[in-house]
Amino acid sequence: MRGRTPPLADRLAALREAVEVADGRLEVPELGSARGLLAKAGAREALGDATVVALAGATGSGKSTLFNALSGSEVSTPGIRRPTTGVAHATVWGADDATDRLLDWLQVPRRHRHPPEPALDGLVLLDLPDHDSVRLEHRLEVDRLVQLVDVLVWVLDPEKYADAAVHERYVVPLAGHAGVLLVVLNQVDRLDAAAARACLADLRGLLDREGLADTPLLAVSARTGTGLGELRADLAKRVTARRAATDRLAADVRGVATALAAHCAPDGGGGVGRAEREQLTDALADAAGVPAVTAAVERSVRRSGTAATGWPLVRWTRRLRPDPLERLHLGQGTGDDGAAVARTSLPAAGAVQRAGVTRAVRAARDAAGEGLPQAWRDELRRTVEVSEEQLADRLDRAVAGTDLGPPRTPLWQRAVGGLQWLLTLVALAGALWLLALVVLGFFQLDDVVPLPRVEGLPLPTLLLVGGLLAGALLALVARPLVGLRARRRARRAEQRLYAAVDVVVQEEVLAPMAEVREGHHRYCTAVTRAGR
C-alpha cells in the first residue's frame, strides 16, 4: 500500500536538505537545477496564487491568433507583422499588485488587462515567442519562461504536429509534468472531419508513447472559434482550483529528484570490511615502525632482566649499551591532557612501507565506495587524500604516546638478584679467605690457623668456586625466564601500539569514509522523500 503523498512544503524541505548535504561534495549539474528550483519555489510562493498559463508553439501554428481569441482583442500581432523583440505578451484577468509583481518576476513587460470575468479571475495568459524562431534571443526567452510558468499549452498545427524539434526538446522532457501540460491541435478548420479525427488519433498515440497519456488533447480553431469554449473551460477549472502553481512545482520537484536519484546507490553500496581494516592497520603499523618498537621493547626488557638476575659484579657493563627504548624516545606515555609528551627517533617509513599504506588506503576506499555512483566515489577520493606528512606525524605521536608498560622489576627477579648478591658475597668470602691464607703462608704462619675442609676440600676454595658456579648456574636458569617475560611484554606492547595505530586509522581514514557514506545515505533519503 502506497503512503500518502507528502505536502509540497515537505518535499521542498527534503530537496533543500539533499542540496545542503551534496553541497561541496558532489560536482554534478543536477545540483544547479535543484538550486534553481528552490529559488523559483521561494519566489513563486511569495507572489500569490495566480495561474500563469503560457501558449507555446512553432512559427505558423496560430498561437498568437489563439492568444488573441482568448484575450478578446488583438493583443499580439500574428503573422509576418509580429514584433521581433522576443518579448512575451500577457493578458491578465483580475489584475492586482500581486499580479504585477508576478509579471515583473517573469520579466513580461507587455501586459493587457482583460475585463472582469469571474470564471477566469486570477488567470495570467502569456503568448511566448516562437520556439523555432531564427532569432536566438527568441528561443532563449521560450526556454526561460517554459521553466517558470504554471501551465504550458503547446499549440500544434496539422502540418507540423509531429515535428521532432518540439517533441524531443520540449514535450518529452515534460513527460513528468503531464498534469500541468495541455496540447492543442489548432487550425482543425483546415481539415475535413475524417482527416481531423485521423490527425487527432495519430497525435494522441504519439503523446501516449512519449509518456503523456494523462495530458489532455483538444482540437481548436482560433479562426472559427471551434473548441475555444472547451479550452476556456479547462483553463477556468485550473484557475478555480488555485493549484496550478503548486502542481507545477510538485512536478518540477519530482523531475529534479529523479535526476538527483541517479547519484544514489540502489542498495546503499558496500562498506569497509574487517579484512580491509586489518590490512590498513597492518600497513600503517608497519609504516609507523611498530615492528622496530616491539623488538626494542623485547630487547629492553631482556636487558633489564638480565642485569637484575646476572652477576652483580658485571652489572655496570650495561651502562656501556644504552637502553633501546631510551634511544628511540619510547615508553614515556602521555601527559595529563592525553597528548604525547615526546616524539620518537624512529626512522621515516621507506618506499616499501609507503607503497603498502597507499595500497591499503586504496583498498579500503574501493570497499567503501563499492556500489556507490561515480560522484560519491570521487568524493571519497577527495576526502581520504591524507598527506604523507600529516599521516606520519599522527602515527609518530601515537607511537610516542603509547604506554609500553611499567618499567618495574618483577619480584622473582629481585629475589634472584638478592640471591646473586648472597652468592657473590660467599664467593668473595672464599676469595678473601684464600688471600689471607696466602699472606699467612708468606709469613709461614699457615700452620697457626687451622684450615677447615669439607670432604677433603678446603672450605675457602669451596666458597669461592661454589659461589661463582652457583651464580653462573642461577644466571643461566633465569635467562629463559627473562626471555619469556620479554616476549610477553613485547606482545602486550605490540597490542597497545596496534590499538594506537587503529585510532589513527579510524580518525584519519575510516571516519572520513564513514562520513561520506553517511552523507550518501542522508542525501538519498532526502531525495527519496522529495520525489514521492
Image (cartoon, rainbow, N blue to C red):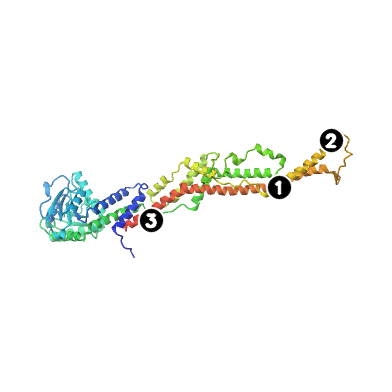
Could you tell which of marks 1 and 3 lies nearer the N-terminus?
3
| Disc on res. 416 | 1
Q: Position of residue 207 (x, y in %)?
A: 23, 57
| Amino acid on which disc 2 is placed | Val
On the picture, is 329 further left or further right than 10?
right
Which element carries disc 3, helix, strand or loop?
Answer: loop
- Which class describes the residues within 10 Å of circle 1: few (<14), some (14-19), or many (20+)? some
The residue pinned by badge 3 equals 266
Front position in the image: 422 or 59: 422
Instruction: For the N terminus, give its image quadrant.
Output: bottom left
Residue at the image position 66 percent from the left and 39 percent from the top: 318
- Which class describes the residues within 10 Å of circle 3: few (<14), some (14-19), or many (20+)? few
Front position in the image: 263 or 94: 94
| Amino acid on which disc 1 is placed | Val
| Amino acid on which disc 3 is placed | Pro
Front position in the image: 89 or 143: 89
Q: Which circle, 2 or 3, is nearer the viewer?
A: 2
| Disc on res. 528 | none
The residue pinned by badge 2 equals 439
Kindly indicate the quadrant of the structure image that contains residue 243. bottom left
